[in-house]
Every structure is written in C-alpha cells, then in structure tokens.
Amino acid sequence: MSAQATRQLPSRSSNISVAEEVTSGPPLHFFDDPSPDTEQETAVASPLATTVELEDGQKQAIEIHEKDGQKVLYVEFEPGDPRDPFSFSKGRKWAMTWTACVYTFFTAYTLSAFAIGVPSLRRELGFNATDAALGLSVYAWGFACAPLILAPFSEEWGRNPLYLGSAFVFTLFFIPVALAQNLTTIIIARIIAGAAGSTGSTMVGGSLADIWRTAERGLPMSIFALMAFLGTGAGALVMAPVEMNSKLGWRWIQWISIMIGTLIWTALFLAMKETRSAVLLTRIAKDLRKTTGDQRYRARAEDERPPLKDLIIISLTRPMWLLISEPLVTAFSLWIGFAWGVLYGLVESIPYVFQTLYGFNQVQIGLVFLAIMFGSVLGFVGNLWQEKVYTKYFPTKGPEARLYGACAAGVLFPVGCFIYAWTSFSHVHWIAPVIGITIVSWGIFIIYLSVFNYLADSYLIYASSALAAQSFVRNISGGGFPLFTDQIYEKLTPPWAASLFGFIGCLLGVVPFLFMRYGARIRAASPLAKRLAEANLNSPK
C-alpha cells in the first residue's frame, strides 16, 4: 500500500447524537468516579491520519495507532466518502427521513385506531371497560420495555436489520388481534406489537442523527416528533368510519392496518440503508482483512465496543440508575410521564365525553381527534421560536436555554386541562372542550421536545441513557392511565376528572421554572453532569 498526504480526518465523535445508543461513549461505571483527566489519558494521542491506496486502485482513509507495540490501521470515512451516511445525497436523506417518520406515524396511529374500535370490540366479545383498555395499556408497556433490550442489538447489527425485522413483527401481530376470540390473545399480541413498534420511536431519532449533521438536524428531528403526535390523532380519525360500519368494525380496523403495515415495510426495505457508522466501518474493515490479508485493518468499534452481554446490562441498568440518582432526570421524567399519561387519557376519554354529553357518533368522535393533531402542529410552530431563543441565550444560560418553551408549556398544559374540564357540559358548545384538548396537546408536544433536548444537552454522550429513562417512565405512565380514565370520569364527572389532571399539572408545571432558575446549580452538584460538562469543555473541537 502507498501512503498519500497526511492530514487530520474529521472526528465523528463531535457529532454525537442525542439519540445515540447507550455506547456512544466509554462505558460508565457508576460506583467508580474517574476524573475527566483520567478519561482523557486513555485516548491515543495524536494518531497519524492518512489515506492508503489499495491494490484495486480504491482509496481508504485510515488512522495509524500503536497498540501493544503493534500498528493498528483504523478505517475511517474520508470527507465526501459516498459510504459515509453524512455524505448521502439530499434526495436519499429526505427519502430515508420521510420513510422512517411515516413508520413513526404508523406506530402512533395504531394507538387511537385501536381505541376507536373499542365499542364494537366490547359488544362482540363482552369485555368491560378495563378489559378493553388493556389493549391500549400493554401496547404502551411494550414500547416502554423493549428499547432497553433492543438498543444494544442495533449497536451490534446495525439499524436496518432491526427496522425490517421489527416492522415485520409489528405488522404480523395485527393478525392475531383481528382473529382474537378472547382477552388473552389480544393482550399477548398487543404487547408484542408494542415491543416491535417501539423501534419506530426509539431508533428513528438515531437514524436522523446518523445522516444529518448537527446544523442540519433541527427540521428533520422536528418532523419526527410531529409525526409521532399526528399519528396519535390520525388513527381514530381515519378508522372511525370503519368502526361505524356494522359490517366492518374493530376486526377490519386490524385487517386494514395489516395492509398499511405491509406497504410501510416495503417502503422501509426499498428506502432505508444502514446508517450506523460503527457498523459500516466494521464491515469495511472485515472486507479489507479478507481481500488484503492484512489483519491490521480494524474498526474502532471492534476494539472499543463492549461485548453484547455487557451492552444489554448497561442498557437495562444505566437508565434506571440515572432515574433514581439524578434529580434532573427524575423531575423531568415525572413531568413528561404525567403529561404522556394525560395524552393517553385523552385517547380514552374523548369517546366517553363526546358520546355521553353531545351524542356524537363514531365518525364525529374521530373528527374530535383532529384537535390533538392541530395542537401538535401549534407545538411544532412554537418550537421554531424556541430554537431561535435557544441560539440567542445558549452562550449565557447553557442547557437551560432549552427551557423557555418548557416554561410556556408548564402554563399551557394545566390551562388546557381546566378549559376541557369546565366546558364539558351538554349546554356548552362542543367546540369549547375541543379547544381545551388542542391546548393540552399543544402543551404536551412542547413538554416532549423540551425534555428531550434539555436532557440531551445536560448529559451529552450519556444522553441516550437519560432519554431512555424518561421514555420508560413516559410509556409506563401512558399505559397506566387508560386503565382508570373511564372510571375517574364516571365517578368524578368530566369537569372534576379533567380538573384533577389540571391541578397535578400545575404542581408539576413548576419543574421547568425551578430548573430555569437553579438548573446550573443542580447540575453542578451532580458528579456525573459536572464531569461530562468539564470533559466537553476540555475536548478538542
């Protein structure tokens, strides 16, 4: 091999995504406390970055390291390398972005699509309200638990196999629901579908971070969040006419979902490519070892990535440790967990309120779900303002510059609950509670994005563990609310039931204001957050 000009290769570590999996950085041992300086000393100093020309005339970027007295040739991507996901064409990037986001949309869509079919389900199988609500709850619980196990497999195998495999399982398990004759079948099928569909939420952000550089990532990530919320309202809207047709009903909602899922799986197969750079570089290194016979070619991940068993243990334990040991993670997880529970509660309560008070049929109830969709659009637009404010104030306020929108949501969310509560009377026009639902949804969307971004900024390379913690709490809470929403509305009446959520929302709404004022001090008291901030400050830009 012949060496070309020596130069500095761009470091991908500077583009660590807020959605990266648990091994974005070196393994973290919570009962040790290595200083930032100690961690820096483990890195290889000043490696030689160069390009080699292979026998077939192709060029390959490498970094030459000394390891145990032997040279190691770590393969890298050159700037503009077409194999580098950052170098994909804009057309390819947008095709992948929209395909992945449509998958996100569909996994959220399934939630309210199931909910709108509950009346015919109960009539046919004789379920009570709690039995039927379990179909919503276990789906969310599958979303909560599966990512803690699946994340390490995307580190080992790449994202694309998990997309295709999970989307196939997700679509397949509409079949047992469509054919179900008892509650057990529905519960098992729905929890498996939720576990498989969780990749539509947890992996898409990582895929977008793989292909869009930091400065480009704002719009794609906002579209991803928007699609998750739009899907929550769209399922009921689209499937309401199917539920209302006595010849179709809840079973046909499942059959139609299979058809949609098959189309989306086909789109994933055609549009998505592997984007995880560590996996791609590992494949390149293996090919080079095979074709050249030179065993010095390596990918960093081959030497630095812990065994899969250790990755799974870290993925299961680190988020839980952060949840109980980091006040920032605890507080914001509780807030988004409650807000997400109210969102699921809305999915459950809208049919009850609007049928009981206004005599709406299923199609009219489906149209009410437009309020959730419109609220998320307002949140999307509001986030554009938040991004401008963040850019302006980040130099002086740091991560707390993410919380201006969160403070607004701390007010919007309970106000929306109270409007929904005290306009839920048969003598008040139905548009009034719809406005309340819109404001609640608007607030929840902002809370979701604010929590996501604030935790990411505060925990840097361990952001995925902090985000996994809030995601776990969020979906466990979301799954729990449908089990008691109808009972609360029946016993307390709609005004006092929604008011209860509003009062709790007021209490939790102080969280962003407290962290806006004292967040820097709280983070300074955290050994982990402090160490990460100092390491980021001292790292080469």
Image (cartoon, helix red, strand yellow):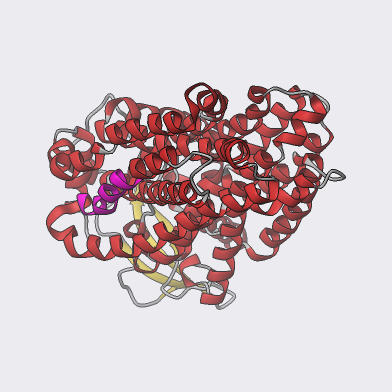
x, y percentage for residue 58?
54, 75
In magenta segment, residue 403: yes
Q: Residue furthest front?
A: 427
x, y percentage for residue 451?
34, 45
Q: Closer to the camera, 18 or 382? A: 382
Residue 463: quadrant of the picture: top left
x, y percentage for residue 298?
48, 54
Residue at position x 61%, y 39% in the image? 351
Q: Closer to the camera, 207 or 438? A: 438
In magenta segment, residue 449: no
Q: Left of 417 or right of it: where is 359?
A: right
Q: Left of 270 or right of it: where is 294?
A: left
Residue 161 appearing in the image: no
Q: Main secondary structure of the magenta part?
A: helix
Residue 243: quadrant of the picture: top right
Which quarter shows the C terminus?
bottom left
Residue at position x 55%, y 23% in the image? 487
x, y percentage for residue 436?
43, 47
Residue at position x 42%, y 27% in the image? 317
Residue at position x 77%, y 49% in the image? 242
Residue 406 appearing in the image: yes
Q: Which residues are magenta?
A: 400-412
Residue 214 position (above or below residue 45)? below
Q: Left of 492 or right of it: where is 198?
A: right
Q: Left of 204 or right of it: where is 134?
A: right
